[in-house]
Image: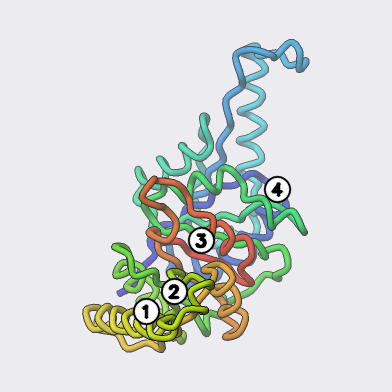
Amino acid sequence: MFQLKKILLPVDFSERCHEAIRYALPPLAKHFNCEIIICHVLPPFLEFGSSELGISLSGEYLVERRKEARKQLEAFLADELRDFRVTRILLEGDPAHKIVEQAQSTGCDLILMPTHGYGPFRRMLLGSVTSKVLHDAECPVWTGAHFQSKSPAEVIPLRHILCAIDLGPHSMRTLDWASRLATEFNAKLTLLHVITALNPRAEDYYFAPEWRKYLIDQARTDLNNLQQAAGTKFEVELEIGDVAQAVCAAAKLIQAELIVVGRGSIVSTLGRFRTHAYTIIRESPCPVVSV
């Protein structure tokens, strides 16, 4: 049975953050009757440069800073969330580190946070805090670049979910999470694998068609084996080309309301966040959950 018992909401009190929560949180919390943990992290002041910035780091100032942050935290969407079980936590330190630490210590099942970057800049930017949380968090992270265009909803219309499978070590976990979510919402689930091993120049060679067919057949066999092990029989789509472009194009084509990608699609063997995963989140026409 799929359950979300605790959802962590890191907030910075921005309008973008308001919109993300108004759209995505109430329907999820209502559906799962889960606890909502809202946290705001006060970043530390530098121990130098305060005089140049005109900032006094007196004890009185820091007390007032915390008091104002607490006031904002208590007032944050108080009316919209009055019927839910809400815990509000004020933290201090490195925001990304504290968010991940809070999620782990409280056993959260999901972190929900918007990306940052607006208009054409969204193609270049992903908030640094969001990036670090995506890299370090153990639980799934729900992100979205289009929350501001959505209106508050009673129910999130999860009719069709796209699950991008890279056939790496985390594929079973990704498929399992997406499968259970789709079952919970009675949604259709489509599996997508993008083959990137083809060199376009190889098309000029005699064996290119055979090599292309081999890769496609092998990917289809691996996906069938994965589904057999998971006990699922979802529709499978195979694409060749750029991962991020193919995933976003497929999501638009099938009008998916959510994309699920695996943590293995995000973290490379060097421990770095892969470029195509950033691009999927930035360019996706719908929210993305990285498992």
Q: Which numbered disc, 1 or 3, marks the residue that appears first in the sequence?
A: 3
Q: Tell me whether circle 1 and circle 3 mark residues in contact (CB < 8 Å).
A: no
Residue 142 — which label? 3
Q: Which numbered disc, 4 or 2, marks the residue that appears first in the sequence?
A: 4
Q: Give me the C-alpha separation between circle 4 and circle 3.
A: 18 Å
Looking at the picture, tell me which residue is in the foreground, 233 or 143. Answer: 233
Q: Is residue 189 visible?
A: no
Residue 215 — which label? 1
Query: Residue flagged by tag 3: what amino acid is it?
Result: Trp
Q: Which numbered disc, 3 or 2, marks the residue that appears first in the sequence?
A: 3
- Quadrant position of the N terminus in the picture: bottom left
Residue occupying image coordinates x 68% and y 60%: 19
Number of marks drawn: 4
Q: Which numbered disc, 2 or 1, marks the residue that appears first in the sequence?
A: 2
Query: In the image, residue 56 lies at what x, y percent?
Result: 71, 13
Circle 4 Cα neighbour tier, 10 Å, few/some/many (<14 / 14–19 / ≥20) = few
Looking at the picture, tell me which residue is in the foreground, 114 or 135. Answer: 135
Q: Give me the C-alpha separation between circle 3 and circle 2.
A: 25 Å
Residue occupying image coordinates x 70% and y 56%: 122
Query: Residue flagged by tag 2: what amino acid is it?
Result: Ile
Q: Which residue is mark 2?
A: 195
Q: Is residue 235 visible?
A: yes
Q: Which numbered disc, 1 or 4, marks the residue that appears first in the sequence?
A: 4
Q: Tell me whether circle 1 and circle 4 mark residues in contact (CB < 8 Å).
A: no
Element on which disc 1 rests: helix
Query: In the image, residue 76 lies at what x, y percent?
Result: 64, 49
Query: Residue flagged by tag 1: what amino acid is it?
Result: Leu
Query: Residue flagged by tag 4: what amino acid is it?
Result: Ser
